[in-house]
Amino acid sequence: MENWIASEFTSINLKDERLNKRAKIILDKLGHAPARTIPQAFRTWKDIKACYRFFDNPAVTDNNILKPHMEKTIERIKNEPVVLLPTDNSILDYTPKKAMKGKGEVCHKRDGIFLHASLAVTPERLSLGVVDAKLWIRGVDYISQTEAHRDDLPIEEKESYRWLEGYKKSCEIARECPNTQIIYITDREGDIIELLGEAIKEKKSGKCADIIIRSQHDRQLDEKDPDGTLNKPYKKLIKTLKNTPALGELEFVIPPSQGKKGRTVKQQIKASSFTFRTKKYNGNPTCKVTINVVMAIEENPPAGESPLCWIFHTTMSINTFAEVRKVIEYYLCRWEVETFFKVLKSGYKIEERQLESTERMKPLIALFLILSWRIIYVMMLGRICPEMSSGDIFCEAEWKSVYKILNIKEKIPENPPTLNEFILMIAQLGGYVGGKKAPPPGVKVMWRGMARMVDFAIAWEAFGK
Ligand SMILES: [Mn+2]
């Protein structure tokens, strides 16, 4: 078994020592076989049956599986001065799995499970682990409700409450890690007035998580508009922000994609504090929320291009250009949670897997969340700590077998290669063609390479060195 699994699962408690042991074996086996089904991964009928029985056990829940990993993640967070918690929602579509019980609607005519997860990431984009993961199924009454009815529900009963729960969890982590600044990050879906209000309230009461939320709504400000009309007497956020003087400029290059040429983008950076007037705030009419807002806007896009514009709500300070730039840079790390979902779906093929019911799927998905994190973690660690020894991350059978396969005529060195060298070797096994100008290996070659590495390591252990 790989070392990291034993250490990641030290505190696992499924109320039965045999189940604890089985959890480690299953994680190890599944990790070895990114695209293989359970029967392919376990080979013998006895092991396959033991695996299915494991997921049948009521003590085996997604929360119990994730708990030890989350505890380890908290330990890793404590060593960092700043940790970002990008959060997102993802659809696990099980429509073709007709026999799977307990599914719910995920979008029009499709059914499956929703996953709402927060990943812990450093500003250098090293992913530390999963700190929050909710696997949930939409109730049947949702479909019969009208949109107006859903709008009127108290926030606790809305589906969007998950974004608020994620923030509350981030605050708990912030209090558990007193020396780390924790920042909760969401895309436009998190632009919910109750969430902004909650973050402001928490900020006043002491140690909590900060937020960076991409804005979705052109909110009404608590300022009379001299050009306003009887129906629209108040100023609006976007127009007012546009008229704010710029603090500075950001320049970057967007690479070409989907038939579009790449181009250089110049954005003006603006920031100010605003008070929003809200129509509804958890049942209270016209409540006011004051929060910092950052805008990055392309004022002169090339002809035919629509201007690139981002607006963020944040509790972080925005007094200087450097501080504002940090808000934008941190937001861009949100991409890591997308990568994480990509590994889960394309790498570990989570939507192609099937157990009897969604209740049994949940702990299986939880195991794959841990494995998906691991791939991203190792890949980024190689970029951030290139000189670290690969022996700290990989076992002897792994690094030695890979070295030998790629350098068939050479003698295996006494000391393991550096992590960076070794990651390039794994990537090579996954089909990566390096070279001076090549970008560093991505997740796809990594999961392919790691799957092959594990097979070599097994052979290495079995057939001698
Ligand atoms: Mn989203």
Image (cartoon, helix red, strand yellow):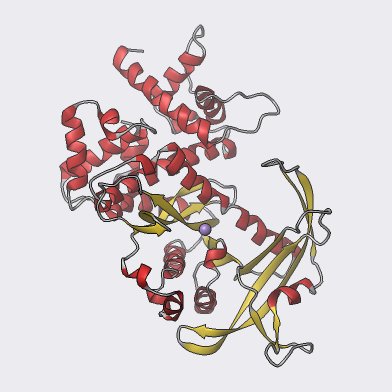
Whether residue 204 sits left or right of residue 101 in the image: it is right
Tell me which residue sits at (49%, 9%) in the image: 408
Percent x, y of residue 174: 47, 64
Whether residue 263 sits left or right of residue 12 in the image: it is right
Compared with residue 363, is residue 142 higher up or lower down, i.e. above or below?
Answer: below
Q: Is residue 413 visible?
A: no
Can you say which quadrant of the picture contains the C terminus? top left
Tell me which residue sits at (55%, 67%) in the image: 210
Q: Give the image quarter of residue 424.
A: top right
Whether residue 368 sits left or right of residue 23 in the image: it is right
Tell me which residue sits at (41%, 28%) in the image: 451
Percent x, y of residue 389: 50, 30
Percent x, y of residue 228: 75, 88
Q: Is residue 226 visible?
A: yes
Q: Give the image quarter of residue 398.
A: top left
Compared with residue 90, is residue 216 higher up or lower down, i.e. above or below?
Answer: below
